[in-house]
Image (cartoon, rainbow, N blue to C red):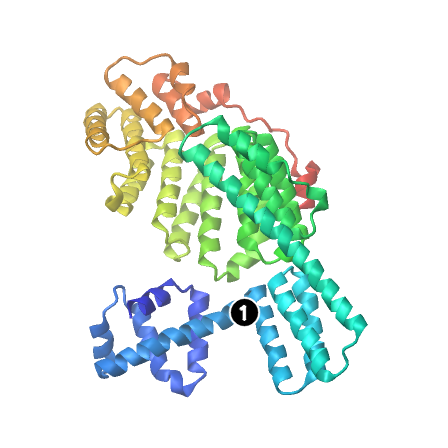
């Protein structure tokens, strides 16, 4: 029952607590509770260890583990029904059917009417359709069906079907546009894909949309189109409209992960335009909005994504508006989050470590960058040929050079170049530029600074590194001259969008 071990290990603290309360609530489940606790503590699944601990036969142990798997899934369904609207509504629908089967037609009708109102309010159309069918049957069974009631129910069903049809058509467009997006960015930057996306999106007409879910999908499609066209301003505008829509609509009231991701998408434009103070204000909103949910959240995907966005964007702000005390607080906060187990995804943890390393280098705390790199390399030692790991290698090279550790730099650069060549590692475009510059420095044949800068497409900190490696100026002087903050006069109280949020 390796799948049982995997399931129990995947549970959040809140989910484990919920399952254990349900297991303890039934005396017959005491043995299952013992199994649950023991398997939860196993780092690696071993059937023999489980059997030895409980002291039962192989057949009985297997039977109990299979039962525990089903019981855990059952309790998880109950747990999700408390916080997931669709789960809850389907539970209400089961209640209506039970009342109908017991002959309580009037009570079943009352419950069904309430269920329909909730399902339509939340745009859970599949549940609403099933509820309307039960509603019609209840009138039939109770002997009070008439033409008016039948026509009203059918009219409502037709309206729901129209909304569903619209959503299905938009979802098809969304999948098409998403496929074209991936073809454009990960296969070939061909303008043919832009033309195809334009053909797909010309059928969109936002004011005529019938449901909140349709509007959300429409904003997603428009946002993808803007990204492919490299129109960051339009992308920012669509994402702001989408965020407003999500926050106003009761349909998305509990969709915290979705709201978080849309909010994070609004950051791209701010970062690319040097609106650092505005970005800080957005982050403040993010912290305030999600604080209460974060304290009780059992959604590990949301929690991990939240801290990933939080730390990497705060690191960005510190890169351009450094403050020594804030930097220390940021690093201490990150270590605290790690120790509490709120972050377990090694890719996310490693990415944040790299952001903190960049921060230490750009604030000229070179000695502080070393220990962070050591932790990063230990964390990712099984992925030595990944772009993620290579990023760490490049930062190690920069840190060594800026500390005048020329022998270390020379040896590490030769080793890095050999690794790339022998393992046929494809660095990303910006990593290639930085590698080229480091090689030119090693050969003492550095070109004009603009040659390297013009080839950087995404990583703004790489531009900062290029200036520093080519010129002897301090990072603070480089920032003042080449990377001015473009919103020093920004006031969040005068920003209409933030005031709305």
Residue at image location 46% in from the left, 70% down from the top: 76
Specify the farthest residue to the right: 148
The spot of residue 312 in percent (x, y) is 45, 41
Q: Is residue 443 above or below residue 485?
A: above
Helix, strand or loop status at disc 1: helix
Residue 271 in view here: no
Q: Is residue 26 above or below residue 134?
A: below
Question: Which quadrant, please, contains the N terminus?
Answer: bottom left
**Relative image position of residue 64 (x, y in whole percent):** 32, 80
Q: Residue at x 34, y 74 (%)?
A: 36
Q: Position of residue 229 (x, y in %)?
A: 54, 29
For image coordinates 68% across by 80% down, the residue present is 108
| Residue for badge 1 | 81
Q: Is residue 68 above or below residue 266?
A: below
Q: Is residue 51 left or right of residue 176?
A: left
Coordinates of residue 351 in the picture (x, y in percent)? 38, 42
Above or below for 249 versus 472: below
- 46 sits left or right of 254 in the view: left
Lateral position of residue 476 relative to residue 174, left or right: left
Count numbered badges in the picture.
Answer: 1
- Mark 1 burial class by Cα count in 10 Å: few <14, some 14-19, many 20+: some
């Amino acid at each position: 029952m390796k799948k049982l071990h995997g399931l129990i290990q995947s549970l959040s603290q809140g989910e484990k607590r919920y399952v254990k309360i349900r297991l303890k609530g039934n005396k017959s489940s005491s043995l299952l509770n013992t199994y649950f606790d023991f398997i939860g503590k196993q780092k690696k699944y071993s059937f023999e260890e489980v059997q030895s601990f409980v002291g039962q036969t192989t057949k009985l142990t297997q039977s109990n583990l299979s039962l525990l798997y089903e019981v855990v899934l059952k309790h998880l369904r109950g747990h999700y029904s408390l916080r997931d609207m669709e789960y809850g509504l389907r539970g209400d629908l089961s209640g209506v059917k039970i009342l109908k089967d017991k002959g309580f037609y009037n009570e079943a009708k009352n419950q069904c009417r309430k269920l329909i109102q909730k399902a339509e309010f939340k745009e859970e159309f599949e549940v609403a359709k099933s509820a309307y069918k039960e509603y019609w049957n209840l009138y039939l069974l109770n002997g009070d069906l008439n033409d008016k009631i039948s026509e009203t129910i059918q009219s409502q069903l037709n309206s729901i079907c129209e909304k569903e049809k619209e959503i299905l058509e938009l979802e098809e467009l969304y999948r098409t546009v998403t496929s074209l997006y991936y073809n454009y960015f990960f296969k070939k930057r061909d303008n043919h894909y832009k033309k195809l996306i334009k053909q797909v999106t010309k059928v969109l007409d936002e004011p005529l949309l019938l449901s909140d879910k349709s509007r959300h999908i429409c904003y997603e499609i428009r946002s993808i189109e803007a990204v492919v066209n490299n129109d960051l301003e339009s992308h920012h505008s669509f994402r702001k409209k989408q965020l407003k829509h999500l926050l106003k609509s009761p349909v998305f009231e509990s969709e915290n992960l979705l709201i978080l991701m849309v909010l994070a998408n609004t950051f791209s434009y701010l970062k690319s335009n040097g609106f650092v103070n505005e970005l800080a204000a957005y982050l403040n909103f993010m912290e305030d909005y999600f604080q209460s949910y974060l304290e009780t959240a059992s959604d590990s995907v949301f929690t991990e994504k939240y801290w990933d966005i939080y730390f990497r964007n705060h690191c960005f702000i510190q890169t351009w508006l450094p403050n020594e005390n804030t930097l220390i607080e940021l690093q201490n906060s990150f270590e605290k989050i790690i120790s509490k187990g709120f972050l377990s995804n090694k890719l996310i943890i490693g990415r944040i470590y790299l952001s903190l390393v960049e921060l230490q280098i750009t604030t000229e705390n070179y000695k502080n960058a070393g220990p962070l790199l050591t932790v990063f390399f230990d964390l990712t030692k099984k992925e030595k040929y990944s772009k993620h790991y290579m990023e760490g290698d490049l930062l190690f090279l920069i840190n060594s050079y800026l500390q005048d550790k020329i022998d270390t730099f020379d040896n590490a650069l030769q080793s890095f170049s050999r690794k790339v060549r022998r393992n046929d590692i494809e660095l990303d475009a910006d990593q290639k530029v930085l590698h080229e510059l480091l090689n030119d420095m090693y050969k003492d044949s550095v070109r004009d600074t603009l040659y390297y800068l013009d080839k950087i497409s995404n990583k703004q900190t790489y531009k900062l590194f290029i200036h520093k490696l080519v010129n002897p100026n301090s990072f603070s002087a480089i920032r003042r001259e080449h990377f001015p903050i473009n919103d020093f006069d920004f006031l969040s109280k005068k920003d209409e969008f933030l005031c709305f949020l």
